[in-house]
Amino acid sequence: MMQLEDSVESLPKVGPTYASRLENLGIFTIRDLLIHIPHRYLDFSLTSDIAGLQPGEVATVSGQVVSLKNQYTRSGRKLQIGQVADSTGKITVVWFNQPFLVRTIFPGDTISMAGKVDWFGRNKALVSPEYEIVKEGKARLHTAGLVPVYPETYGVSSKWLRTRISDVISEVNLDEYLPAALIKKYNFPKFDEAVRSAHFPQNLADVEPARRRLAFEELLRLQLASLKRKTQWKKNVPSYCLSVDKSVVESFIKTLPFELTPSQGKAIEEILSDLSKDKPMNRLLEGDVGSGKTVVAAIAALVTFANGFQTVIMAPTQILASQHYNTLKTLFDPLKVRVSLVTSSIKKSDLGRTDIFVGTHSLIHKKAKFEKVALVVVDEQHRFGVAQRAELVKKSKTRTTVPHILTMTATPIPRTVAMTIYGDLDLSVLTDMPRGRIKVTTWVVPPVKRDKAYAWIQSLVTSHGLQVFIVCPLIEESEKETMQDVKAVTKEFGVLSKIFKGLKLGLLHGRIPAKDKEKVIETFKKGKTDILITTPVVEVGIDIPNAGVMVIEGAERFGLATLHQLRGRVGRGAKKSYCLLFTDSKSQNVMSRLSALTKYNSGFELAELDLKLRGPGEVFGLRQHGFPELKVASWQDSELIKASRDVAEAHPELFSHLRPEALVS
């Protein structure tokens, strides 16, 4: 009997071609196929004989094919026209542009058809009905009762999916795995019932309980994978035991040109406590844009240095890596801590002995001297693949031990989501902002006010010396910029060069070579460029204290968290700063979402709001950030998320035969 974890390629009539197409729908295993649930159902529950069919109604009818032929209309359109008869009469049947039907349906076949009854000329007809040839002993899937309609992709229709899923349900092992007491407690249908009712329900009332059970299954697998990773991590031994000399930490804090916030202080205590334990740290530091995560990581690196060991810090972009390098160099130069920036172009001989390595994924490939690495810091970890993170840890470990791991993110994640995705990590959250940070005033700008906004921006640059970011959205729904995106931002650069006459404009996008990118940023930093036209490559890592205006074109195309992070690029100096959200949208939903930015300055509040407003799959820009996309469950369903967490903690033995990576498709 087939198992849920078997590849879809093992199914009859699926082969490499269909397996490749199914990957576009996130379907790799038989389990994935079964939780690819319909997004709606066609109601073909009304059955009739041919004589009883009425124009305008949707009905199912069965009969014998009398004739079927290809025919051209006067306009040259190809149609398939025929007649079907039962004991009460005949009806015309018409399809368009499906010439293969005459080689599929033959006179004498018994056929079941479902669709809307209409007129074709003077005759009653079924126009473009769903159809299937009736075979003895075989259930009707496409023309009877509630017929599922699925998310589709090229070459994979709902009709194809119905047939495969029906075959799988009868062949695969759908044994119940939840204890009876839990099924009763949460009022779930049994697993096999839920699968059948989700795809082929007897009535619509069966659908929601089935969907809820399958959603629970999806969340439970995430929770169990997370707990399993946590259990496995606890078996590790730290590469080096660190002792924390609090006097060294306190002396360093006194040299800082700013006062630490209460939540920074708390996070530092939690991290230092982890570093002194006989188990390796595995902690997530979550903090809003500008909340001071780098300084917290720097103190962990200082403790590592004081013990005679090395730290490795990996960032997702060269811009962010350079930013960290400059910050750490400034902080640590007086203490003679050696900080090195590892880039793709640097030679091994140029590195020398180093206490703190900073770089992108080139840290993995460059032969840097990782002699005694006790701490690995991964910034914006969801932007790296699992394999990249694992490779860095592997490179930093000894044969039998692993370094302490600190991961950081500025993407504000609602707590329910963080506990599910990052349940294997201990969580530290920076909830307050450094003293003296000036609130950025935010406005939504409709098309009618665009020209006035441009004139006002010009006056701010010429009269107050402020610098400006203008961010253009990516055209493609992807984090990687395409040539189409580059052309769009380059075109905008040309348009704005004519509008802002007399000002110096710069252009930045992801396709510019790293060296040229650094020159563009350096020129902007030194104040030699007034306005920087860019794609969202500036979302993280560019710190320009004199930048006082952030303009975001097509603001409706961004999630609230991304907009908030872009806004965080300004207001980093002493001058009053502004964020202008340009949108042509008139949608009430879009306007209410964007206006939230004018009211809230906390990324965490905005993330919770985004969770309520945008719905599953769109939450706070996580789709573009490598987070798992739920197929059945919703990140909004906090009650079901909590239930899945409770069950995972109480029953870690569920799915115990599976590897952690197999728990999450």
Image: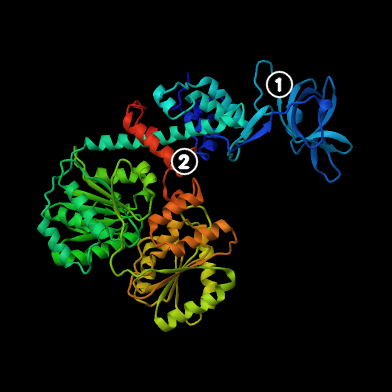
Lateral position of residue 433 relative to residue 590, left or right: left
Where residue 518 sits, quadrant-wise, is: bottom left
The three-letter code of the residue at mark 1 reads: Val
Q: Position of residue 404 (x, y in %)?
A: 21, 46
Q: Position of residue 539 (x, y in %)?
A: 40, 61
User: In this view of the protein, which residue sits in the foreground, 440 or 249?
Assistant: 440
Query: Does residue 13 appear in this view?
Result: no
Where residue 277 sits, quadrant-wise, is: top left
Q: CA distance from mark 2 to mark 1?
A: 37 Å
- Secondary structure under tag 2 reads loop
Task: Compare marks 2 and 1 and give the one earlier in the sequence.
Answer: 1
Q: Residue at x 58, y 25 (%)?
A: 166
Query: Tag 2: Cα neighbours inside 10 Å, few (<14), some, or many (≥20)?
Result: some
**Above or below: residue 382 compared with residue 433:** above
**Above or below: residue 420 compared with residue 583:** above
Q: Position of residue 145 (x, y in %)?
A: 66, 27
**Above or below: residue 21 compared with residue 412:** above
Query: Tag 1: Cα neighbours inside 10 Å, few (<14), some, or many (≥20)?
Result: some
User: In this view of the protein, which residue sits in the foreground, 364 or 93?
Assistant: 93
User: In this view of the protein, which residue sits in the foreground, 454 or 77?
Assistant: 454
- Secondary structure under tag 1 reads loop
**Residue with the mark numbered 2:** 630
**Above or below: residue 597 compared with residue 608:** below
User: In this view of the protein, which residue sits in the foreground, 490 or 128?
Assistant: 128
The three-letter code of the residue at mark 2 reads: Leu
* Numbered label attached to residue 134: 1
Outermost residue to the right: 122
The quadrant of the image that shows the C terminus is: top left
Q: Residue at x 39, y 32 (%)?
A: 662
User: Closer to the camera: disc 2 or disc 1?
Assistant: 2
Lateral position of residue 68 relative to residue 394, left or right: right
Q: Residue at x 60, y 40 (%)?
A: 154
